[in-house]
Image (cartoon, grey):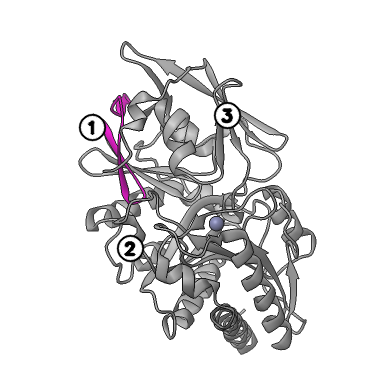
């Protein structure tokens, strides 16, 4: 693939520890040396960045880092970052129960392929200068001792599910509308190959404003995390939602491929993530690893028929996750009726999100800004209106279905 040899020329100063900084919150992740080079524990890195590691058959692993999905095979010096294959100078390794990534992932791959991260080689610090709501880890990072167990332990410990806060029956609902990125964080830019420039933060704000308006027209209250071109800290997005006792959280984003190649430019479509509340996320993490393997086998980028049914069955007792998934499905269905891109389905975000909040939360990737056709589509005001109106309709539908269920006396 094009442009990837640059990797091999990257000079990497390897610290003893990696400092991960997000605003005032700092986490330290140890870096270990081997005879061939420096490595970092995949689970600790992912946890520090609000992501996860899951393993799959045949020594395959999936690591989520912010919006980026890495697929890694033990012993193979290549990784897939979203849709692009990236050569590495060292392979990922397994040491006992520990899965190790070459430090090059931190120093070169993440800064290049994952949005929202900056690696300061001098300070030896990885900064989360931006990210999106689903990565919110809360203002207090967990101490390292609380990090999830190493991948592949097979543990199935399940804490009691967190009780979701019910939507307010008989009151006006409050939907928190989050426009992704903002201010110094532009989000993604596109499209690949030139043409009118698209900057994610402006599209998300435009659509979020329209969405808030449509929701208000539909009789629910809407609160925007930002209404201008400003950067709202991650933890603040969650806090805004919590402080105002939102019932639902909807975050708007524009998708991007992991590379700037012409092949990557063809990637398009829309997808909706549902976000798990952190406590239940922790409790279900290991279980989900098993489920992830099914998706892995079928190919991460293959169209998914009903990718979540097997997960949802296991989560039936967790109404919060079910609500979030219901909302995501409703939104995805709505977009399907008019969006020119293919439906990429409902996805589960395996991130610690909105810790301490008790509301269903979804993140909508309304299209690929890297795809020239979709960039043009997303830039059109009438299209933005249609997207916003559709999401609003889905939210209102969801609320009325929820009301009907709750009003039916089953709770
Ligand atoms: Zn985004």
217 relative position to 340: left or right: right
Q: Residue at x 31, y 56 (%)?
A: 262
Measuring 77% from the left and 82% from the top, which residue is drawn there?
171
Q: Which element type, helix, strand or loop, lies under badge 1?
A: loop
Whether residue 409 is in magenta: the answer is no
- Residue 296 is situated, as x and y percent measured from the top left of the image, at 28, 52
Q: Quadrant of the N terminus?
A: top left
**Residue that numbered label 1 is attached to:** 76
Above or below: residue 405 compared with residue 205? below
* Of residues 69 and 115, the one drawn nearer to the viewer in this rendering: 115
CA distance separating discs 1 and 3: 28 Å
Segment colored magenta:
76-98
State whether residue 219 appears in this view: no
Placement of 329 over or under 196, stated as above or below: below
Q: CA distance from mark 2 to mark 1?
A: 27 Å
Can residue 165 be seen here? yes
- Disc 3 crowd rating (10 Å Cα; few below 14, some 14-19, many 20+) is few
Answer with the quadrant where ligand 1 appears in the image: bottom right
Q: Sequence-wise, which precedes: disc 2 or disc 1?
A: 1
Which of label 3 and label 2 is nearer to you?
Answer: 2
Q: Earlier in the sequence, mark 3 or mark 2?
A: 3
Front one among 151 and 101: 101
Q: Nearer the viewer, residue 86 or 313?
A: 86
Q: Is residue 370 left or right of residue 386?
A: left
As drawn, is 138 to the left or to the right of 70? Answer: right
Numbered tag placed on residue 144 in the rendering: 3
Count every numbered label the image shows and give the total.
3
């Amino acid at each position: 693939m094009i442009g990837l040899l640059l990797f091999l020329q990257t000079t990497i100063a390897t610290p003893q520890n990696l400092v991960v900084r997000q605003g005032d919150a700092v986490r330290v992740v140890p870096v270990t040396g081997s005879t061939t080079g420096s490595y970092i524990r995949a689970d600790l890195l992912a946890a520090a960045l609000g992501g996860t590691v899951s393993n799959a058959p045949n020594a395959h692993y999936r690591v989520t880092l912010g919006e980026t999905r890495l697929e890694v095979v033990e012993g193979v010096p290549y990784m897939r970052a979203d849709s692009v294959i990236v050569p590495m100078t060292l392979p990922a390794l397994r040491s006992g129960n520990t899965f190790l990534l070459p430090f090059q992932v931190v120093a070169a791959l993440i800064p290049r392929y994952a949005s929202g991260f900056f690696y300061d080689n001098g300070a030896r610090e990885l900064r989360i200068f931006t990210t999106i709501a689903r990565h919110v880890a809360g203002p207090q990072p967990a101490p390292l001792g609380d990090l999830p167990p190493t991948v592949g332990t097979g543990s199935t410990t399940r804490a009691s599910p967190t009780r979701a806060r019910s939507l307010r029956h008989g009151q006006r609902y409050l939907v928190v509308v989050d426009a992704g990125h903002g201010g110094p964080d532009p989000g993604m830019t596109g499209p690949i190959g030139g043409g009118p420039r698209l900057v994610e933060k402006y599209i998300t704000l435009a659509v979020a404003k329209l969405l808030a308006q449509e929701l208000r027209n539909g009789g629910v209250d809407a609160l925007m995390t930002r209404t201008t071109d400003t950067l709202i800290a991650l933890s603040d997005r969650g806090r805004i939602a919590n402080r105002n006792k939102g019932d639902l959280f909807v975050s708007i984003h524009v998708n991007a491929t992991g590379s700037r190649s012409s092949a990557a430019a063809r990637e398009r479509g829309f997808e909706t993530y549902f976000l798990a509340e952190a406590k239940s996320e922790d409790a279900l993490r290991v279980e989900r690893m098993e489920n992830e393997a099914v998706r892995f086998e079928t190919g991460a980028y293959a169209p998914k028929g009903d990718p979540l049914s097997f997960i949802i069955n296991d989560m039936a007792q967790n109404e919060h996750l079910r609500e979030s998934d219901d909302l995501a499905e409703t939104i995805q269905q709505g977009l399907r009726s008019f969006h020119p891109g293919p439906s990429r389905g409902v996805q589960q975000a395996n991130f610690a999100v909105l810790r301490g909040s008790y509301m269903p939360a979804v993140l909508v990737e309304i299209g690929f800004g890297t795809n020239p056709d979709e960039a043009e589509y997303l830039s059109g005001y009438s299209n933005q209106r249609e997207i916003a109106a559709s999401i609003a309709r889905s939210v209102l539908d969801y609320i009325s279905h929820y009301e009907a269920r709750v009003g039916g006396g089953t709770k």
